[in-house]
């Protein structure tokens, strides 16, 4: 092998290792997901110059081939390579390169770094959500321990649930099996509510409540969650 060729290969290897190390440092520092994705695109694109790299978001493995084919058509070339990004055993997306094949040897390493960054962000988000939920439960439990009035406890439950679920309104409703009537105990939407606090209506007039009462399980419909009281 000519000395020039060996030197060129070594230089390319050093560039690849340096690029991977820079991205890995961002992941280790728990940088925001967008920052890691931007760094991956920039570093990988620089390595395969004059090619370009992009990250495609899709959770359907069967769709990846169609995505790669579409990008190839748009780029006017058949030289397109897509490497899946797998997070937690599931396809999250793909790292797609439009370049000569020789320039894409480390795409798999970059895709693994992307997966690590996404998994790290998801884990931090889950921890924050868990802490938020525990905080909400603790605040309600404190009211109960302090023998607060039932109305204050019910109001706190509805308010905390609305905040945790990220919804505009939550109503706490009681069901009386003897009368088969529903009673609204408290709602976070105040005067905007169609039914005021203390209002009653027959079970058959509450279609979302029927399966909840019948099964004792949650019912999710049109983005809202109904829960048996």
Image (cartoon, rainbow, N blue to C red):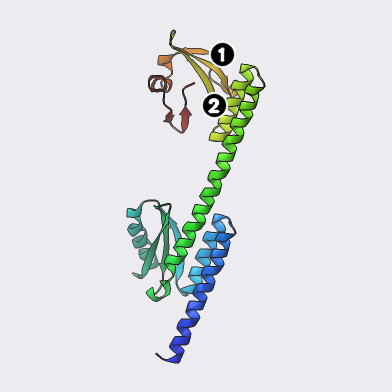
Determine which of the numbered discs, if any, sits on residue 58 in the image: none
Q: Is residue 223 above or below residue 61?
A: above
Q: Position of residue 69 (x, y in %)?
A: 34, 62
Identify which residue, 126 or 81, lies in the foreground.
126
Task: Please tell me which residue is depicted at 32% across the width and 54% down the height of the picture.
Answer: 62
Question: Dot 2: few (<14), some (14–19), or many (≥20) neighbours within 10 Å?
Answer: many
* Residue drawn where x is 44% and y is 86% of the image: 6
Q: Secondary structure at mark 1?
A: loop
User: How far apart in space, not on screen, are marks 2 and 1 (Cα)?
Assistant: 15 Å
Question: Residue beneath label 1, please?
Answer: 198
Residue 191, given in percent of the width and then of the height, sits at 60, 21
Q: Secondary structure at mark 2?
A: loop
Q: Position of residue 11 (x, y in %)?
A: 50, 81
In the drawing, does residue 140 fall left or right of residue 57?
right
Image quadrant of residue 9?
bottom left
The answer to which of marks 2 and 1 sits earlier in the sequence is: 2
On the image, which quarter does residue 164 sit in? top right
Q: Could you tell whether 191 is left or right of 180 in the image?
A: right
Write down the residue under mark 2. Answer: 170
Extreme-bottom residue of the structure: 2
Res 134 → quadrant: top right
């Amino acid at each position: 092998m000519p000395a020039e060729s060996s030197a060129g290969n070594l230089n390319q290897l050093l560039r690849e290792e340096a690029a991977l190390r820079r991205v890995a440092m961002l992941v280790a520092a728990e940088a925001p997901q967008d920052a890691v994705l931007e760094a991956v695109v920039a570093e990988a694109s620089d390595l395969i110059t004059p090619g370009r790299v992009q990250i495609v978001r899709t959770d359907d493995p069967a769709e990846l081939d169609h995505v790669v084919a579409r990008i190839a058509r748009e780029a006017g070339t058949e030289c397109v390579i897509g490497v899946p990004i797998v997070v937690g055993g599931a396809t999250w997306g793909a790292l797609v390169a439009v370049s000569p094949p020789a320039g894409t040897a480390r795409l798999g390493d970059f895709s693994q770094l992307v997966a690590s960054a996404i998994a790290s962000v998801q884990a931090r988000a889950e921890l924050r959500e868990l802490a938020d939920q525990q905080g909400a439960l603790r605040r309600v439990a404190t009211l109960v321990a302090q023998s607060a009035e039932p109305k204050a406890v019910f109001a706190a439950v509805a308010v905390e649930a609305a905040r945790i679920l990220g919804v505009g309104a939550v109503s706490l409703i009681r069901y009386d099996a003897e009368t088969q009537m529903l009673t609204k105990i408290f709602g976070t939407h105040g005067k905007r509510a169609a039914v005021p606090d203390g209002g009653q209506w027959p079970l058959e007039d509450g279609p979302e409540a029927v399966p909840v009462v019948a099964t004792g399980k949650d019912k999710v419909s049109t983005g809202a969650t109904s829960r048996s009281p």
